[in-house]
Image: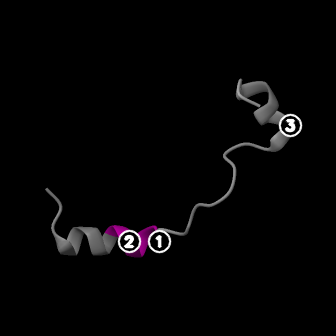
Amino acid sequence: TLDAADLGAIEEAVPADAAAGERYPEAQMAHLDSER
């Protein structure tokens, strides 16, 4: 169980907006995503 201090340390190390965008470049997604 994470307490408030644990969650604060995680948020400080990796802010919620640190990761954004596609996981792979668009050309590679065409080979991976069957719904495109």
22 left or right of 4?
Answer: right
Q: Residue at x 72, y 42 (%)?
A: 24
Q: Looking at the picture, tell me which residue is in the foreground, 30 or 25.
A: 30
Q: Residue at x 34, y 67 (%)?
A: 10
The residue beneath circle 1 is: 15
For the residues labelled 2 and 1, say whether their Cβ atoms are less than 8 Å apart.
Answer: yes
Q: Residue at x 58, y 61 (%)?
A: 19
The residue beneath circle 3 is: 27
Q: Residue furthest front?
A: 35
Q: Position of residue 29 (x, y in %)?
A: 76, 35
Q: Looking at the picture, tell me which residue is in the foreground, 20 or 5.
A: 20
Tell me the amino acid under the disc marked 2.
Glu
> Neighbour class for label 1 at 10 Å: few (<14), some, many (≥20)?
few
Q: Is residue 11 magenta?
A: yes
- Which quarter of the image is occupied by the N terminus? bottom left
Q: Earlier in the sequence, mark 3 or mark 1?
A: 1
> Magenta segment range?
10-14
Q: CA distance from mark 2 to mark 1?
A: 5 Å
The residue beneath circle 2 is: 11
In the rendered image, the vertical position of residue 16 relative to residue 36, given as above or below? below
18 left or right of 10?
Answer: right
11 left or right of 4?
Answer: right
Which of labels 3 and 2 is toward the front? 3
Q: Callout 2: helix, strand or loop? A: helix
In the rendered image, the vertical position of residue 26 relative to residue 30, given as above or below? below
> Neighbour class for label 2 at 10 Å: few (<14), some, many (≥20)?
few
Q: Position of residue 15 (x, y in %)?
A: 47, 71
